[in-house]
């Protein structure tokens, strides 16, 4: 049998627009958990939201696509994604305060 494990990737995201005060972090956490991803999400002082998401490449890509819309009250203007080094110490997906 051959190994069909999907590639494991990590991405750092910066989401801009009206993304604070609209439950964007909770929405991201719920979506990431449903996709089996690990990482974290947090608000930034400049009004953006940042996240580290890691897991199977297809699931990470799905989250990045969904992040362009976010929760109903959000108005996302940009989702910037850069490669990140996977953090093997992360388990689950949390909200950082």
Image (tube, grey):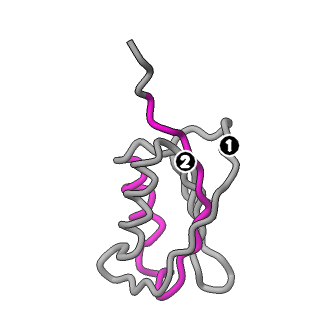
Residue 65 lies in the magenta-colored region: no
Q: Residue at x 34, y 73 (%)?
A: 71
Q: Where is residue 48 shown, x and y percent of the image? A: 59, 80
Residue 19 lies in the magenta-colored region: yes
Q: Earlier in the sequence, mark 1 or mark 2?
A: 2
- CB under 8 Å between callouts 1 and 2? yes
Q: Is residue 38 above or below residue 77?
A: above
What residue is pinned by disc 2?
A: 54
* 90 on left or right of 7: right
Q: Where is residue 77 shown, x and y percent of the image? A: 46, 87
Q: The magenta stretch spans which residues? A: 5-33
Q: Residue at x 37, y 47 (%)?
A: 35
What residue is pinned by disc 1?
A: 87
Q: Where is residue 75 shown, x and y percent of the image? A: 39, 87
* 90 on left or right of 15: right
Residue 55, disc: none
Which of the image's four quarters has the C terminus? bottom right
Q: Where is residue 6 shown, x and y percent of the image? A: 44, 36
Between residues 82 and 17, which one lies in front from this camera angle? 82
């Amino acid at each position: 049998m051959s190994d069909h494990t999907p590639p494991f990737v990590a991405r750092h995201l910066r989401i801009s627009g009206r993304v604070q005060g609209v439950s964007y972090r909770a929405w991201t956490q719920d979506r990431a958990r449903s996709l089996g991803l690990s990482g974290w999400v947090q608000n930034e002082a400049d009004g953006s939201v940042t996240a580290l998401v890691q897991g199977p490449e297809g699931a990470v890509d799905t989250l990045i696509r969904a992040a362009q819309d976010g929760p109903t009250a959000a108005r996302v203007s940009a989702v910037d994604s850069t490669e990140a080094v996977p953090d093997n110490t992360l388990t689950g997906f949390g909200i950082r305060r």
